[in-house]
Structures are given as C-alpha cells and as structure tokens.
Image (tube, rainbow, N blue to C red):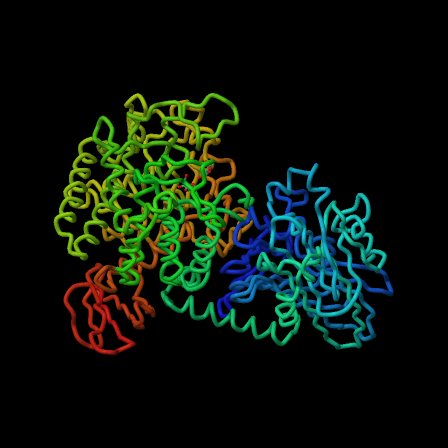
Amino acid sequence: MKFGYFDDQNREYVITRPDTPLPWINYLGCQAYFGIISNTAGGYSFYRDARLRRLTRYRYNNVPLDFGGRYVYLRDNESKEFWSPSWQPTRHELKDYSCRHGMGYTVIGSTFTGIESHTRYFVPLDENLEIWQVTVTNRRATKASLSGFASIEFCLWDAQDDATNFQRNFNTGQVEVEDGVIYHKTEYRERRNHFAYFACSEPGRFDTQREAFLGRYRAWDNPAAVEAGELTNSIAHGWSPIGAHQVKLELEPGETRQVVFVLGYHENPVDQKFDPPGSQIVNKNTVKPVIARYLDSKQADAAFERLRAYWQTTLGVFQVNTPDIHTNRMVNIWNAYQCMATFNMSRSASFYESGIGRGLGFRDSNQDLLGFVHMVPSRARERILDLAATQLPSGGAYHQYQPLTKRGNNDIGGGFNDDPHWLIVGVSAYLKETGDWSILDEPVQYDNEPGSEQPLYEHLQRSFNYTLARVGPHGLPLIGRADWNDCLNLNCFSDTPGQSFQTTTNKDGKVAESVFIAGLFVYAGRELAAIADRIGLGVEAATYLAEANKMEEVINRHGWDGEWFLRAYDDFGHKIGSKECEEGKIFIESNGWCALAGIGLEDGKAQSAMDAVAAHLATKHGIVVQQPAYSKYYLELGEISSYPPGYKENAGIFCHVNPWVMIGETRLGRGDAAHDYYSRINPSAREEIGDLHRCEPYVYAQMIAGKDAPTFGEAKNSWLTGTAAWNYYAIVQWILGVRTSLDGLEIAPVIPKSWPGFTATRTFRGVVYKIAIERRGEGNSVALTVDGEAVEGNVVHAPTDRRKEVVVKGILS
Ligand code: GLC
Ligand code: GLC
C-alpha cells in the first residue's frame, strides 16, 4: 500500500493522505538554520545545534504522535468552524490533502468547505530564518470571511534543560512585541546575545502566553483563542512563551491572498545588545531589514527560486540514467539529498533522534563524507579539519563532538578502537574527489589544545599507529569499547540495569579482538600508503603496506572460520561469529568489510564469505547483522544481546552495512547480486509495501526488522544513518562504477547482466564528464574511449588542455 507518489520531475515526494504510518519528515535548511517538518506540519527548528540552540519546542514520543509544530489554523467567522489545513492538529477530514516534500522545502495543502490553502515552508540560503507562505483561495460561490492564525511554541534554548528544569524555566520566559513582531528573548537579559522572532506580513492580533492562546487544559487541537476568533494580545512573563498571529481574510469568490510568516534566529554583537544602550530592550535595528525583506512575498519567492537553483546545481554534480527507476531517483535525488542531511545533522535530530543526545560522531561523520564530498567539497574540508582537531594525541578519538563548540564530548568518551581509521577513509575520499593535497599540510590541533598543532597528515599516521600499538593475543586489533558495532561490547560485562553500554568498561581490554577492525586497518593502511606515495614518502608508504599485508596474514590465520570470516574474539579468547558458536555464528561486518577491502579475493575466501552471507544472512528485506540471533543476554557480549532478536544490532537488517556486501559482490564481479541487495533495501523499491515498511519511501532507515522479529520488514530510525552515504557510495562508485581515485575518474561498472548500459554526467574537478556505458557481453571488462580516443585501463585522466567537457564511452564485455 502506498501513501503517496514520487514526482521525479519536481524532485518531490507527494504524500496524499495525512495519516501515514509514522510522521514522514523533511529537513528545512542546509547550512546553519535547520528544522524538521512532518507531513502534517509537526516538528521544530534550531540554529546549528539541536540541543543547545533550539528555537521551538517539540515533545517527542507524544500522544498522538507528532504533536506540536508550525501550525496554521483557518476559521470561518460565520460558521465559527476552524480547522488546520495540514490536518494536524485539529484533524478534520480534508479534501485534496497533499504534502509535497521537496529539496529543502515542504508544501502542505488541502481544501475544506471550499477554502483552499497551501503553505510553503522553507529556509532561504544564507539566512537564519524560515519562511511560511500561506496562500488561501476562496473556491466558494460566495464571499468568505475568515481569520487565519499561525502559531509556534518557543523552546527556552537548551532543549534538554527546557524539558526538565521547570523550577527555573517557569520563571524565565520573556518576550517583546514591537510593530507586530514577536521577539522571544528568554535569557537575553543575561548571557545570551541571541533571540528568536516570529513575524507576520499583515497587521493583526497576537498571543505570546501559551495559556492565553490555548486556554486551560486545552491542547493545540482546540485553542480557546482560535475558537473565540480573537487572540488576546497576551505578553508572556515566565511559563511558556509562544508566538501566535491572527490575520483577517475577507475573500471574494475566486480570490487568492498570501500571508507570509517569518520565524528566525538573530545574534547581536555583545556591545549592541540593547537599544537604547543601558536599557533592557532588545536592539532590533540589526534584524528589522531582514524581517522586512522576507515578509515581502516577491522576495520570498525569489529566495525560493535561489534554493531551487542551489539544489539543481548541487544534485547536478552526478546524474544517471539507468534502466531502473528506483536507482535513478535515489541516486539523482533522494539519496544525495539524504547525504546532505546526514552531513549536517549527523545523528542528532530526526523523528527518532531527539536532538539532545548526540553530537557529531567521529566515525559517523567521517563515513558521511563518502556520500557528501562531491556536493560541497569546501564544507567537507572544514568538517575533516574539525573532526581531526578532536583527535587525541594517542591517535584515538572522542567518539563524538558538539557541533556548537566543536569540542570532543567527554560524557561519551572514547576508546572505540575503529574510530581513528575512519579519518583516513574520510580524508582519502576528500583527496580522491578534489585532488586538494594542501589539506594534508593543514596544522590541526589534538584534543583542541592550542599549541598542539601538527599537519593533518600526522593525524593520519597516528590513526594508523593507534592500532599497531593495540593488538591482542592473536595479533588482531583490540576492540576497545566497541568497533563499528557499538553494541558488541566485549569489555563491558555490565549487570547493572540502566548502565550505559557505551561508557562502562569492567575489563582491562587486553584480550578481546576485532576481525572487523583488522579488515578496516588493512583497507586504511593501503589508502594511507597510496597517499604517502603520492606525496613522495615512498619509505613510509612501504611500511604502511607491509603492516597492512601483515595484518591480512593474521586475518587469514586467525580470522578465518573455514567458510567465512570470524567476527571477533571475546575477553576469554573465545570466537565470536564462528560455526563453533551456538548463536551469532556468522556476522555481516567482518565478511562485508573484508570482501570490500579485497581481502581473500585471490584465494577464494572473499567469494566463500559472500556465498555464506547469501546463504545465512540474506533475507528478502535485506541482510541481517548476524545469525542465529542472540536469544538471551550475554554478559560478555554486551548491548548486542540486549535487543530482542531481529531488532537493531541483534540480527536486525542494519542498512548501513548492507552496502559493504554490495561492494564485496562487485569486487567479485557479481553485478546481479550487488544490485539485487541494493534493491532489497532501496526505499523507493519498497514504496509499494508502505504499510509494512512504515518509514518514508524516499529515504533510507537505519534498520529494518530482521527475520527473527515479529515485525520482519518494518523499518525504523529513518534519515540519520550511515546508510545514506554507504548506499550512495556503493551504487555510484562500485555498481555503476563511476569512481573517484587519486589519479582521476575511474570507470569500472559492475552492473546487472540484463542492463544494456547506462548514461551519466559527472562534474569532477571542474570538468564535466558525459559518460555512456554500453553492454556488449555479460562481463565487466570495460574498453574506454575519451573524446573518441581509446585509452588504456580504467582511469580517465584530467584533460591536459582547457576542455571543460569530455565524452567518455565504455563498452562492457
Ligand atoms: C549507529 C551509530 C554508528 C554505529 C552503528 C552500529 O548507527 O551511529 O556509529 O556504527 O549504530 O552500532
Ligand atoms: C545504541 C544503538 C546503536 C547506537 C548507539 C549510539 O547502542 O543500538 O545503534 O549506535 O546506541 O549511542
């Protein structure tokens, strides 16, 4: 069953009924001001940091789901009936409801009693504000006398404190209203120099105290002031400041009017906070021109067109046309778009991530670069340098850092022994995309300590050496707190309810080893060697290679189980992910990763491992993490066994790691298998089973319940997941085979046998490559011509002349 449809022409997903199985959201903003918005206008906004600079309040896990948002109400002043054109919060039965989620904007519209309305929500480029353009048309045969209302609830900035510290927060709320603009200035009187505002293009009444607007013991579905048809001009003192505006809409038959609302964030220089100086009144001179500008419909439209153009260019970097519509729309539109969201949000703010728990993950953000770096390389560069600056002198890393402060987050700590290697992966992806070698010379601090600056290249060395200094009894890397699988906690041994598996360690950590990290080390070592080689450090390159080769031997000796790669050794030196185990005999991570890294390609181990994955882990909804699922809690394994079988890391389909197997299959030349796995979790390909899948059909979810779960096939935790970057990377760089390399653009497709070929356009280092692949045989060997000239091998080198456009033809046989 479907709840809408893709409009690929407009790069939109159109939701046609409001009661989707879960709130289906979109992101507004792609630079500093952000919001999440659901298909019924639920959600909230923030500036940079979803926890520390939250503009509007949101109650997660609410009943009904997703209550609170950017709500518009219309009221018929004759019948006194009022409704929400976005369905929530009043939930009237609407005609022609639709929600169009597009690139950085959402339009929600409907008709009720002959009154049609559409609200377009978006964040203009380079501004810290959002615009709501509410367009109302009278489709009745008679004149309509209406009132329009718009409302938001302010958050007192720190979203966590806001939801817990009521003894203080019920006293601090403050607002000002000037020229009809509501200014939320809680704590501005003391240490903040920022405030929020909510403005309306029409004069009218307002409310700023929640109780005055809603009435006692009422909710957003039935605000007393809307019912009465008149806001009260209340001024909030403490309690819960809100922003609500009321406008009059007298519409002749057929007449259309647009009202614009602007919600924004503004900072003043510390010495210009007040006007007049010495008063307690917010200085609004700096923000008034911005507000005036965007309250103008024409300016708002122009800003919207700029946003459209931005996405046209950004997505235009890579566009493809294959025989598979699901591949096309995900690669060309939604998967790339999701990569922007994961780059910006990491794992902080979605319908599942409450925006208070997590900063930016070290491993997560480095991996996110794989799907993002081609879109805005300059921001990728900045991110790499920020991440590297949180690296510890040991080469290890804080597991997370706060985007606002850019400092490592002590509460979560470090010691996840895979973390440092992802920096090598991220930097390598950046170098391959841009050829900007200067980044390696950038002086970067350790642990944000001034004076500790060393070139970024040294950070990479320390990342590599971190593992060399931490190997266990078999010569495999010690796992530390955990590796990629946060929940395989082999040194935790927690028996205390509620204790965090992420921070508790009861073992000295000198025994438990990870085959996954070993594979990652081999991969990262070879990447680093290639980098060192290019910058003339041949001797170092040889050392990295030697160490990587040595580790590969250790994997062959101690990390192979006969038919597949082992997963780990626990604190007793017992195998994990072996046929000898009762549960958890085979895992996806070590098998996917080793094959991806090319380990065992020559001696058949990779193929055997991929065959074992197909036999034991693959399901029709994707590949599960391990089998058999853990049926009980294992003290020595940690959080993985805390989940009921089939969910999350305990044999759920963790979509993030499925692409490792897809890439592994391409390394074996098996394009059919690779694309088949790709299609199983491709959300667009799952659109038809929307009532089972339940999450948005336009973005990946972190997890789909595995075959051991009663809800097999149900997705959860959409949007913010490494799945976005990895699927993008797998389909584009390995299946379609349009791959960045240090030497140039590599063309090495491993596509399904049934595809006659595909065409693509790729802008790479300032040159547009027009690529056409034609299949003439069933294999994967490719004969290339560049502008008609045959070239040796798979790499298209940059044109030596000034050509800005190059035609690349590839014949597959
Ligand atoms: C989550 C985390 C990621 C981790 C994965 C597996 O997605 O954000 O860092 O690798 O879970 O545990
Ligand atoms: C839980 C989740 C895991 C996530 C971790 C991050 O362990 O299962 O997916 O990575 O939390 O805090």
- Residue 554, relative to residue 380: is it above or below? above
**Residue at left 63%, top 65%?**
287
Which quarter of the frame holds ligand 1? top left
In the rendered image, which quarter is residue 131 located in?
Answer: bottom right
Kindly identify the residue that appears in the image at 54 percent across and 62 percent down.
Answer: 13
Asked if one can make out residue 68 in the rendered structure from this viewpoint, the answer is yes
810 to 598, vertically: above or below: below
Q: How many marks?
A: 0
- Identify the residue shown where x is 78% and y is 50%: 214
Please state the horizontal and vertical placement of residue 655, each as a whole percent of the image. 41, 46
Q: Position of residue 67 (x, y in %)?
A: 67, 48
Q: Split into 4 quadrants, where in the image is the C terminus?
A: bottom left
Instruction: Please give left or right for residue 62 compared with residue 778 in the image.
Output: right
Residue lying furthest right: 78
514 with respect to 241 (left or right): left
The answer to whether residue 752 is visible is no
**Which percent across, then down, holds residue 318?**
37, 66
- Position of 502 with respect to 587 (left or right) is right
Q: Position of residue 501 (x, y in %)?
A: 45, 30
Q: Quadrant of residue 393?
A: top left
Extreme front residue here?
278
The front one of 806 and 196 is: 196
Pick whichever, 715 or 753, lies toward us. 715
**Closest to the observer, 507 or 549:** 507
